[in-house]
Amino acid sequence: MANLMKTAQTKAKAAAVRRLPPRWGGWLLAVPPMLFTLLFFLAPLVLLMIYSFGKIDILTFEIKFGWNLGNWAALGNGVYLSGLIRSLVLTLVSTVLCAVIGFPTALAISRASGRIQTVLLLAIIVPYWISFVVRNYAWLTLLGPRGLVTRLLTAVHLTGPGQDLRYTTGAILVGMVSSYLPLMILPIFVAMERIDPAVLDAAADLGLTALATVRRVILPLSMPGFIAGILLVGIPATGEYTIPSILGGGKTLMVGNIIHDQFLGVGDIPVGSAIATALMGLMLVLLLATRRRVRQLEDVL
Amino acid sequence: MSSVRKRHSFSTAVLAAVLVLFYAPILVVAVNALNQDDTLNSWGGGTLRWFRQILADGRVRGDFGTSALIAAATTILSVAIALTTVLAARRLPHGGRTAFNMITYARLMLPEVVTAVGLFLLFRRFGIEMGLVPVIIGHTLFCSAYATVVVQARYAAVSGRFSEAAADLGAGPWRTFRRVTLPLLAPALVVAGLLSFTFSFDDVVSSVFLSGSSVETLPMLMMGMIRQRVTPEVNAIAVAVMTITFAVVALVVAATSVRAAGGVRSSRDGATDDE
Amino acid sequence: MTNDTSALAKAPANPPEPATRAGGGAPVLKLRSLRREYHGAAVVEGVDLELRDGEFFSFIGPSGCGKTTTLRMIAGLEDASSGQILLSGKDVTKVPAHRRNVHTVFQSYALFPHLTVAENIAFGLRERKRPDQEIRARVSRMLELVELTGRQNARPRELSGGMQQRVALARSLVLDPAVLLLDEPLGALDLRLRRQMQLLLKTVQQEVGITFVYVTHDQEEAFSMSDRVGVMNAGELVQVGAPRDVYERPATRFVADFVGAVNQLPARVLGRSGDTVEADVALLGRVRVPATGEIGAEALCVVRPEVPALGPADGAGPGCLVTDVSFEGPQTSVGLLAADGIALTIVVPSHSLPRDLATGDAVTVSVREDNLWLIPA
């Protein structure tokens, strides 16, 4: 009996991994992408870490390498630290907003059927294909003193007349949410589609109202989608550069802008590298923490 | 039963609000591109003046060409990398395949500033001047990741038993690829190419860091114009780019199937009533 | 290989010609000590088999027994860890799948979705660079054979499961393989369709005269279609023989269980003479029974359910109490409890039973000695 079980198990494992015979020179095919990734993805990241320990000479702009922790200490400095914290808070709020708005949206789409659903999906995806610059520039127009949104908000007495809503934290938030929302909606939608309709029938059969079904069945079962969405939104949003540039005006508001200034502005590259490495580290921690869920991410994507 | 209707109407309302959130800015841009009033504070009557202006502007035309060139190169590279990655991953042992996947997702999710800045350091270190090629490489980094995901999804749904059947019927590895795998992958390759082109064309971060002084892309130009003052030409450029994007997407959607363009679900054509 | 497809003129089968069935001559397929390992564990072990040209052979066994793996090794879709595969006398063990003259009908059909029915069937012929005219002729003959004329321009997704099945069959058959492999091809079909397809497969095989190697877990299906069957268990080929032989003379307890011989009475061997053994069987007493070679002192006497006859309480033979009566249509399954707590399940034609037979009735059972069989304990 045990023998039978064992052979069944090995067979199942084998079937799951059934891959083509290696004599097709698969290793040869792997070389170009591996080379590219090694050279242009991994090597730069390593370089960043090395530079973060370097020190720049203000006079000669030469960089000396060594185990200089000065840059890292500088991160604790008020200027950088407040920028970093503001960035993270903004990202967190944006991500949460995306999740809160994204869930009912995905729900509504999954309830639609056939052609309407396809149209809705396209309607959600298409704006993502339009450049960030264009979309967020449009918000500038809408949020200016005479902008449509400003006028609307004045009409409902949420702000005073002629208020310039551009270049504020709120403007950046609006830009972030409207830009990143599709990336949250889609994974949640995919996760919802995976739910066996029979489960929903069972919930109704057991006496759950529609609202309770959403809260106790659909929401938990969409978790893989949420995780995917949070990763897809939260991580890139932390390093966002374009949106704060446009909607934050000239002021340096987020990490992306700080790094930009260090590299192309002030020129203190080691500090910039330290900040970038810190960002990278944060992302890695997040990724590792959700490592088990990454496999679900694969399904969802 | 009324609770069901209530829930329905709430989520539907949110959906409607979201659609407004997405499309209101776009509509405003489109309308303003035709707006006579150059302070854009009110409607001054319709005009094509801004379009004529950008068409006449050599800098705009030049940057458009540059962006298109970069995007084309990026697309070719990205699709090639995606194809080789997907084909190779299938033949690797489990550990290798996981590594490939992790690196693909890392490229998707790491903030673009980090990868761009890293590349900046890399090129500086080896004395390579910033310009066209560094930008293309920067774009390819993340575009190829998107392309890989799209092709991977289709490949998983499509290969395996078909390549076995082809081998069983006498087709060697190359013949199988040409006659079975490639045709079945084609829709995904098209979508991957579209995605790469669009993302590359619209890219800001990598372009800013890696273009140096000699190269300027259209998004960079637009960013500069926005910073200086509100100018209606930006609207015209935006509308022009949007129209081209829509036209291309519409073409592709018409040619393949609507679901393939969405890229969300794996295509079910050819599914047999199987296991 | 001279299985000329020009012999396939019309779809309806002609009565099978004895010469094409289990034709004589050299074995067309020979497996020698075939073995397949995964991560150190053997999934197929020590398989030896010889198949004759024109034979219909089935591998049967429970899930995970290795029958599909064996089939895939013959096809070349999986490598053998050790052992040999000889096709028409040639060693093809190291030859890749696309260069072997065997073709497979897959469980999921694996029809190419981007090609029409005709293009699917023509796939292998195009690979061999056959001239267009020849391809067209052979494809239309195949379509006739599998009764799909007129569907050549349809796409697979437009066809029902049964039709896709037939296209898959045609696609492999048109290439004149030395051996045709079928991996549980009828699994996805409903009962009625399955019976139809079984008939079609058998008919086609006899017309075309090619060796079929069939894999299924459905013992009835295998028995009804095959010239010989091979029972596999945990990677080993346990018994090979004509369906009737395997059924009436299982070699081991496993095979007996698998073919449904549920009654196995303990027996003590008293002596042998030639092909029969004298044994003391529980409930039945001393009997002279046919037996397989390797019987020790203790054995099991296999009493197939249909063997015992039911008699009235005062009849000849040991007495039993009825524990269960299950009417199944043409036959009825009766559970019996005898002395010493021995339980038997027998199956009898329904019409031969008294209508009022009920649980608790006393009856007697009688058997004929030569319908019994002894297996190792």
Image (spheres, helix red, strand yellow):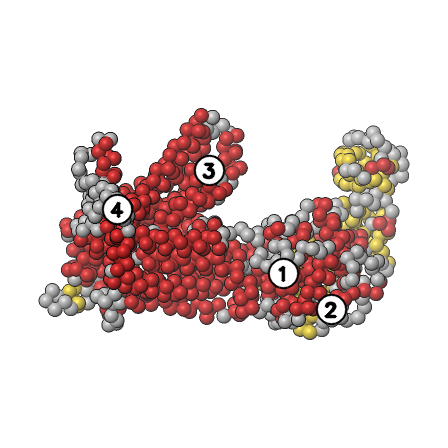
Quickly name the residue at label 4: B35
Q: Are marks 4 and 1 on the same chain?
A: no
Q: Say which residue appears at 65% left-offset and 64% top-offset.
A: C122
User: Residue B192 occupies which quadrant of the picture?
Assistant: bottom left
Q: Position of residue A269 (x, y in %)?
A: 19, 62
Question: Can residue C340 be seen in this snapshot?
Answer: no
Q: Residue furthest bottom?
A: C90
Q: CA distance from mark 1 to mark 3?
A: 39 Å
Chain at tag 1:
C
Disc 3 marks which amino acid? Arg
Q: Say which residue appears at 43% left-offset and 34% top-offset.
A: A214
Chain at tag 3:
A
- Per the rendering, the mark at residue C28 is 2
Q: Secondary structure at mark 3?
A: helix
Quickly name the residue at label 1: C120
Q: Secondary structure at mark 1?
A: helix
Q: Is residue B169 left or right of residue A156?
A: right
Q: Position of residue A288 (x, y in %)?
A: 35, 52
Residue A28 versus residue A174 in the image, above or below:
below
Q: Secondary structure at mark 2?
A: strand
Q: Nearer the viewer, mark 4 or mark 3?
A: 4
